[in-house]
Image (tube, rainbow, N blue to C red):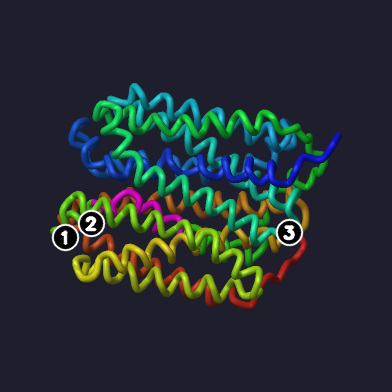
Amino acid sequence: MKPLPRALLLLALILAAINLRPGITSLAPLIERIAAELALSRSLISLTTALPVLCMGILAPFAPRLALRLGLERTIALCLAVITGALLLRVVGHSSAVLIGSAVMLGAAIAVAGPLLSGFIKRYFAGRMGSVVGWYSLGMAIGGAGGAVLTVPATQWLGDEWTRGLAVWALPALLGLMLWLFLPNRIETDNEAATGLPWRQPRAWLISAFFAIQAGLFYALATWAVARYHEAGLSLMHSNTLFSVSMLMGLPSSFLLPWLAQHFKNRYLWLLGCGLLSSISLAMITFQPTVLPEVWAVTIGFGLGGSFALSLVLPLYEADSPLAVSRWTAMMLFTGYSLACMTPVLTGLVRDMSGSYQLPFMVLTALAVLMTLLAWVMRHGPKRVPA
């Protein structure tokens, strides 16, 4: 079989990555409106963010085994098909059951696709993993920012129906599915995936803990940042603009930082810098949200975007084969997302109980400081022990 052009493989990777975020971030600009129209509490409406993240954690360990059965490329295509179907379902989303059901479908598909896309990078781009992970994380940042920035204009353009604004993200998912169906499938023969996840590796736990905190911070902000700014006295339009800016700032950091980490071979120092930047930014959003809010929207987006992109690189240097990388990534996603899914729910719950967003955002700031300390602990680099 003639090898596929690297450019086509990279395009397939980027298209898949773009579709891993909009189904979640597209809800944030509309969440208060949806909650009001459906008469849902903040803790209940936050399940539309929390449940996908929970599924992304719980189901991630099944990804390597599914790839052994179906093949890596066909499994990722199946995930894109499920994402397309879940987003189309939101056309009839005037019910909490439909919103939550589509959220579960999205989480299940993203859970399986995530570890396998890391294995895809290891298989086809082993010599340039840092730069390719930069494109991969840039694709996710584009999808996340697109969901945050374009959903409101799309809703207004489609008759001001928020169900249509949410469902429009099925179009890029369908485009990605068509390309992945074109790729030849390769059945896995490496039975290493059947040996389980690297639970006995201390570094796997450190990486998973770091990933859990940065993911929890991202999804808490994706759910509640607009509400926090609005409560502090900023207009709803200004609050949405600040949230959009923070999402857009994930674009340069997602691409730039993996490249810098590979070029200068000090990815953990870059992780430490992202943690410090995120901690300072969250502290300002917590205690002084109206003081230079544009500055802190830029820095929190850059810090968290860089933290996420660099965390995706870490498993690639801890294992040697595509499925071994998938195992490390599956553990990172399983542990990380299973814990991170609680962050937006608890943030909404504490807001309901305290009557203010300041207390839950104080906790988020403390988590950012803990994330920084974990980056410091991991700074000496991989110390791999056979699983």
Give the Cα distance between marks 2 and 3.
Answer: 41 Å
Taking the spot 71% from the left edge, 33% from the top edge, the residue there is: 183
Please tell me whether mark 1 or mark 3 is closer to you in this view: 1
Q: Is residue 321 visible?
A: yes
What residue is pinned by disc 3? 319
In the image, taking residue 34 as reference, residue 70 lies left or right, namely: right
What residue is pinned by disc 2? 228
As helix, strand or loop, the secondary structure at mark 2 comes to helix
Taking the spot 46% from the left edge, 68% from the top edge, the residue there is: 371
Mark positioned earlier in the residue sequence (2 or 3)? 2
Please tell me whether mark 2 or mark 3 is closer to you in this view: 2
**Circle on res. 232:** 1
Residue 175 or residue 43, whichever sits in front: 175
- List x then y, in percent, for residue 45: 29, 39
Instruction: Give the magenta-colored segment's residue range.
Output: 213-226
- List x then y, in percent, for residue 370: 43, 71
